[in-house]
Amino acid sequence: MAQTDAQLRASKKYHQKYEYLQARVTPAEKETVTTHAESMGESLNAFMRRAFAETMERDKASKTINFK
């Protein structure tokens, strides 16, 4: 079933709020991270967002941000 014009507009509006990040990992790494996220009751996306936020907060607190 095709999307209506209203559904297409709503989808476009939703996607404009977000940026797309991409990470390349091996299948084994993905499985490990996915399994861990699920064990924490999170989706892979939610886990990654939490990991980013916690790491940045920890880096800020220790003043050891090192962008190479």
Image (cartoon, rainbow, N blue to C red):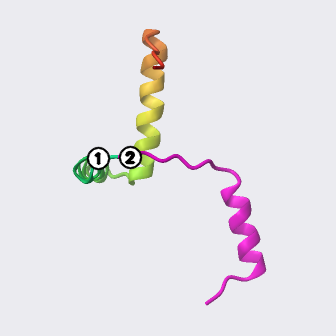
Secondary-structure class at tag 1? helix
The residue lying at 30 percent from left, 52 percent from top is 34
**Residue 64 lies within the magenta run:** no
Question: Mark 2 to mark 1: distance in Å?
Answer: 13 Å
The residue lying at 68 percent from left, 67 percent from top is 11
Say few, some or many: other residues with alpha carbon within 10 Å of mark 1 (under 14 / 14 to 19 / 20 or more). some
Secondary-structure class at tag 2? loop
Task: Name the kind of residue labelled 2 in the image.
Answer: Arg
List x then y, in percent, for residue 25.
33, 46
- Indicate which disc residue 7 carries: none
Q: Looking at this rendering, what residue extends furthest in the top direction? A: 63
Q: Circles 2 and 1: CB distance less than 8 Å? A: no
Q: Nearer the viewer, mark 2 or mark 1?
A: 2
* Quadrant of the rendering where the C terminus is positioned: top left
Say few, some or many: other residues with alpha carbon within 10 Å of mark 2 (under 14 / 14 to 19 / 20 or more). few
Closer to the chain start, of discs 2 and 1, is: 2
Identify the residue under disc 2.
24
Task: Name the kind of residue labelled 1 in the image.
Answer: Val
Above or below: residue 58 compared with residue 2: above
Above or below: residue 57 compared with residue 7: above
Identify the residue under disc 1.
33
List x then y, in percent, for residue 4.
73, 83
List x then y, in percent, for residue 20.
57, 50
The residue lying at 31 percent from left, 49 percent from top is 37
* Quadrant of the rendering where the N terminus is positioned: bottom right
List x then y, in percent, for residue 50.
44, 38
- Residue 35 relative to residue 66: left or right: left
Above or below: residue 8 compared with residue 20: below
**In the image, which residues are magenta?**
1-24
Q: Looking at this rendering, what residue extends furthest in the bottom direction? A: 1
